[in-house]
Image (cartoon, rainbow, N blue to C red):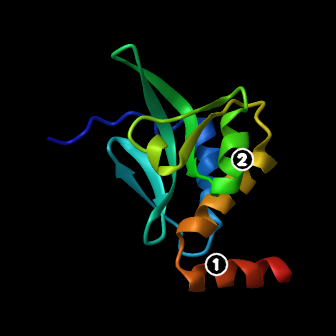
Amino acid sequence: MAHPQMFDDQDPLLARVREIAGKLPGSQEKVSHGRPAFFTTKVFCYYGGSVRVAGNWVRHPHSIMVLADSSDREALRELPDSFVPAYLGPSGWTGIDITADTDWAEIGELIEESYRLTAPKRRVAELDARDRR
C-alpha cells in the first residue's frame, strides 16, 4: 500500500529546502513514505517527520530530518526546535522544525553535514572542490 502524500508541493519552506539540497553535487529528490527525500545513493534529508507520543502520531510537517555526526548529535537534539523522529531517530537522525524565521544558514550546514555523511566520496570531493573556488 502506497503512503499518502504528506506535504504541500507549493510549501515555501519546502522550496527553500529544495534549493539548499539541490545545490549539492548529484542531489536528487524522490517521495519516500509520503515525504520528499533528498539523496545521492543514500537519503541525506527528509522534509517532514513525526514522533510517537503516548501511542499517537504527532506530525512535524514543516521540518527537516538529517543525519548528524555522532559528536554533534546530542547538542543538536538539545535545541528547542529539535525532535527525535520515529523510526530513524535510533539510527542517528534528528528532526528540526523550521519556519520562515529559521536560521537558513544553519539549516544549510545541517543538510550539508548529512550529505557528507551519506554521499559517495567522489560527490563529497566535488563539493570540496567547488567550495575551494
User: Real-space Cα distance between discs 2 and 1?
Assistant: 18 Å
Against 12, is 93 above or below?
below
Q: Residue at x 33, y 36 (%)?
A: 5
Q: Can you tell which quarter of the image residue 3 is in? A: top left
Q: Residue at x 62, y 48 (%)?
A: 17
The answer to whether residue 20 shows anywhere in this view is no
Residue at the spot of label 1: 124
Q: Residue at x 53, y 49 (%)?
A: 92
| Quadrant location of the C terminus in the rendered image | bottom right
Q: In this image, 3 relative to 5: left or right? A: left
Q: Residue furthest right?
A: 133
Residue at the spot of label 2: 107
Give, as a three-letter code, the residue at label 2. Ile
Q: Residue at x 50, y 29 (%)?
A: 61
Q: SS of the residue at dot 1?
A: helix
Give, as a three-letter code, the residue at label 1. Val
Q: In this image, 109 relative to 1: left or right? A: right
Could you tell me residue 36's position as x and y percent?
44, 48
Q: Can you tell which quarter of the image residue 112 is in? A: bottom right
Contact flag, marks 2 and 1 (Cβ < 8 Å): no
Number of labels in the image equals 2
Against 16, is 44 above or below?
below
Q: SS of the residue at dot 2?
A: helix
Could you tell me residue 27's position as x and y percent?
53, 68
- The local crowd at label 1, few if under 14, some if 14 to 19, many if 20 or more residues have their Cα within 10 Å, is some
Against 34, is 116 above or below?
below
The foreground one among 106 and 56 is 56
| Quadrant location of the N terminus in the rendered image | top left
Could you tell me residue 110's position as x and y percent?
69, 52
The foreground one among 12 and 125 is 125
The foreground one among 74 and 118 is 74
